[in-house]
Image: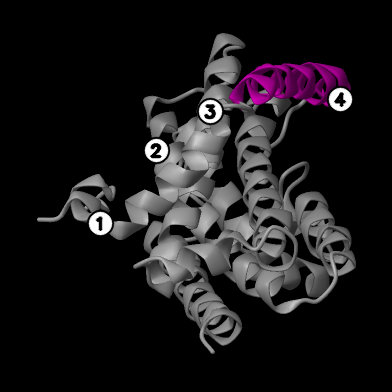
Amino acid sequence: MSVAERARPALPRVPALAVLAHYLVGYRRTWRAGVFSSFLLPVLTVVGFGFGVGAYIDQGVGGVRYLDWLVPGLIASTALQVAVGESTWPVFSNFQWIKTYFAQIAAPLRIGDLLAGHLAFVLFRVLTTAGAFLLVTALFGALRSPWALAVLPVVALLTLAVATPTFAYASAVDSDSWLAMLFRFAVIPMTLFAGVFFPVDQLPGALRWLAYLTPLWHGVDLCRAATLGVAPQWSVAGHLLYLAGWAAAGWLLAYRSFRRRLVV
């Protein structure tokens, strides 16, 4: 083995781990800025919505205290927002501005490695945020079942269901204005009408079915069932298969879009 070969850093057995390590090294310099907000946001949300709005809802929702009913929806919607936030401008920037993906594909990495490594970092960001949210809400006594720990794998699947198609979208657009439109016309309506703040069955028929089609409603229903210790409105297998379908379709779209941009 030559001196140059000995000096060259070896890739991990799973090349996607090298991509994940790249993002973790960058995050190591910025994580402190997010720790405070990761705990402050759930505290403010619980106090503002759970105790503030909840004080005017005497009967709760379905016999459940409004705070306890609200918390799982907030966890799922926060996961959605973090996942989309980490899958829009960072992906767009890696293509248009700092062109990180072009540098990575010039190394012995494949399209699947780039996608898997970056998605693994998005999962890391969402799970740490959701974990902090669970801890804070547990201190407020808003988790009524030990099944609340199942929220984390549900959130992970929800993250993949929304992050993979968002990767495809962010890699296909030619202006970051399209990313703002995604938040305005998709993320915000989903947050408002997918069962986070009030039951979906209170919506008119057409809007109700649109809410059922969103991945967020399925994540909210599963998270709520876990934290309350009750059965979800839909079957668990149906929820999981639906979210997995979104994740698989999104992966295929993102892989195709990345390949079109990076392989000449």
Image height check: is 228 above or below 264? above
Whichever of callouts 4 and 1 sits on the residue coming sooner in the sequence is: 1
Q: Amino acid at mark 2?
A: Ala
Locate residue 33, reporting x and y percent: 69, 22
Mark 3 residue crowding within 10 angstroms, few (<14) / some (14–19) / many (20+)? few
Could you give the CA–CA distance between mark 4 and mark 1, rounded to whole angstroms?
48 Å
Q: Amino acid at mark 3?
A: Arg
Res 53 label: 4
For the residue labelled by badge 3, is the local secondary structure a helix, a strand or a loop? loop
Whichever of callouts 2 and 4 sits on the residue coming sooner in the sequence is: 4
Q: Amino acid at mark 4?
A: Val
Q: Does the residue at mark 2 contact the one at mark 3 (Cβ under 8 Å)?
A: no
For the residue labelled by badge 4, is the local secondary structure a helix, a strand or a loop? helix
Res 28 label: 3
Image height check: is 204 above or below 22? below
Q: Main secondary structure of the magenta part?
A: helix
Q: Which residue is mark 1?
A: 14
Residue at x-position 48% and y-position 80%: 252
Q: Which residue is mark 2?
A: 150
Span of residues in magenta: 31-58
Q: Does the residue at mark 4 contact the one at mark 3 (Cβ under 8 Å)?
A: no
Residue 204, quarter of the rendered image = bottom right
Locate residue 124, reporting x and y percent: 47, 40
| Residue 35 lies within the magenta run | yes
Image height check: is 255 above or below 53? below
Could you give the CA–CA distance between mark 1 and mark 3, rounded to whole angstroms?
21 Å
